[in-house]
């Protein structure tokens, strides 16, 4: 009898140990499963935030060009882009700020060479939209002016880059300014001023730029006919 009882206790203990091991395995499996779930969840959240951040900072639609440092010229330039994004320009740069009238392309291009972003809008843009644009242009190296003939309601331009926008509320506008205003990688004359001596506060109507060089224009009273050479 004693042997039988001892054997029964051994079997009972073995069953208890086996049950305990099964419980431990189940607990470990649950813990590993929960840990794996948390890891997958974290990876998913990180991925979602990365995608969301990229979408928030995306600047799809920016057009790029390849103008080098532009030469100075005293006459009007026939730019390929409207508004222009580089090329020849006037020796005087446009003083950065807000303007209610159109500007000379040649002066504004010089400002962009110094790192300015030129924000232009259709002359018929709603007044509240214009006011929002004016509120945005509160720092240096920003130009704001109306511009006839735009393909979009608002266009942001800088040296060799341009972005068409749906309006003053387009979220891409502030991101464009952040990226391209005084960008050392895209600004030919990084660090040059956008105000002060050497700039002009005049609009296109106040300071018209001639279409031909003053030195090439005939003087008042001069004959337009070629002079005859003296006879021998």
Image (spheres, rainbow, N blue to C red):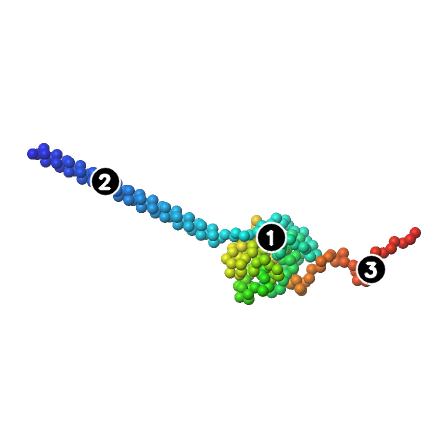
Disc 3 is placed on an element classified as loop
Res. 192 visible in picture: no
Given the current orientation, which residue lies at the most extreme bottom position?
Answer: 127
Q: Earlier in the sequence, mark 3 or mark 1?
A: 1
In the displayed structure, would residue 161 be above or below residue 4? below
Which residue is rendered at x = 17% and y = 37% of the image?
Answer: 14
Q: Residue at x 63, y 49 (%)?
A: 68
Distance (Cα) linking label 2 and label 3: 113 Å
Q: As drawn, is 42 to the left or to the right of 59?
A: left
Question: Circles 3 and 1: CB distance less than 8 Å?
Answer: no
Query: Is the residue under label 3 in contact with that under label 2 (CB below 8 Å)?
Result: no
Q: In front: mark 2 or mark 1?
A: 2
**Residue tagged 1:** 159
For residue 215, above or below residue 127: above
Give the structural element (helix, strand or loop) at label 2. Answer: helix
Q: Name the residue tied to disc 2.
A: 22
Report crowding for label 1: few under 14, some 14 to 19, many 20 or more residues within 10 A (C-alpha). Answer: many
Which image quadrant: the N terminus? top left
Between disc 2 and disc 1, whose residue precedes? 2
Give residue 210's position: percent from left, percent from top: 71, 59
- Residue that appears at 39% across and 50% down: 45
The residue under label 3 is 223
Residue found at the very far left of the displayed protein:
1
Residue 65 visible to an observer of this rendering: yes
Q: Is residue 36 left or right of residue 211?
A: left
In the displayed orientation, state which residue is furthest to the right: 232
Displayed quadrant of residue 7: top left
| Residue 71 located left or right of residue 60 | right
| Residue drawn at point x = 59 percent, y = 62 percent | 122
């Amino acid at each position: 009898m004693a042997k039988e009882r001892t054997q029964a206790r051994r079997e009972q203990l073995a069953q208890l140990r086996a049950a305990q091991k099964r419980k431990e395995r189940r607990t470990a499996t649950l813990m590993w499963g929960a840990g794996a779930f948390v890891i997958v969840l974290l990876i998913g959240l990180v991925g979602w935030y990365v995608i969301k951040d990229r979408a928030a900072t995306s600047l799809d639609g920016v057009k790029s060009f390849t103008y080098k440092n532009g030469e100075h010229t005293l006459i009007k330039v026939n730019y390929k882009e409207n508004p222009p994004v580089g090329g020849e320009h006037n020796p005087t740069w446009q003083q950065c700020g807000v303007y209610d009238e159109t500007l000379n392309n040649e002066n504004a291009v010089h400002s962009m060479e110094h790192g300015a972003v030129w924000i232009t809008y259709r002359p018929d843009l709603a007044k509240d939209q214009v006011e929002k644009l004016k509120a945005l242009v509160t720092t240096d190296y920003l130009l704001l002016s109306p511009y006839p003939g735009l393909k979009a309601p608002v266009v942001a331009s800088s040296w060799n880059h341009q972005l068409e926008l749906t309006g003053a509320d387009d979220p891409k506008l502030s991101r464009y300014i952040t990226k391209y205003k005084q960008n050392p990688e895209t600004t030919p004359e990084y660090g040059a001023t956008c105000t002060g001596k050497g700039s002009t506060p005049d609009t296109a109507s106040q300071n018209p730029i001639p279409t031909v060089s003053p030195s090439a224009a005939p003087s008042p009273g001069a004959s337009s006919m070629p002079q005859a050479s003296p006879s021998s």
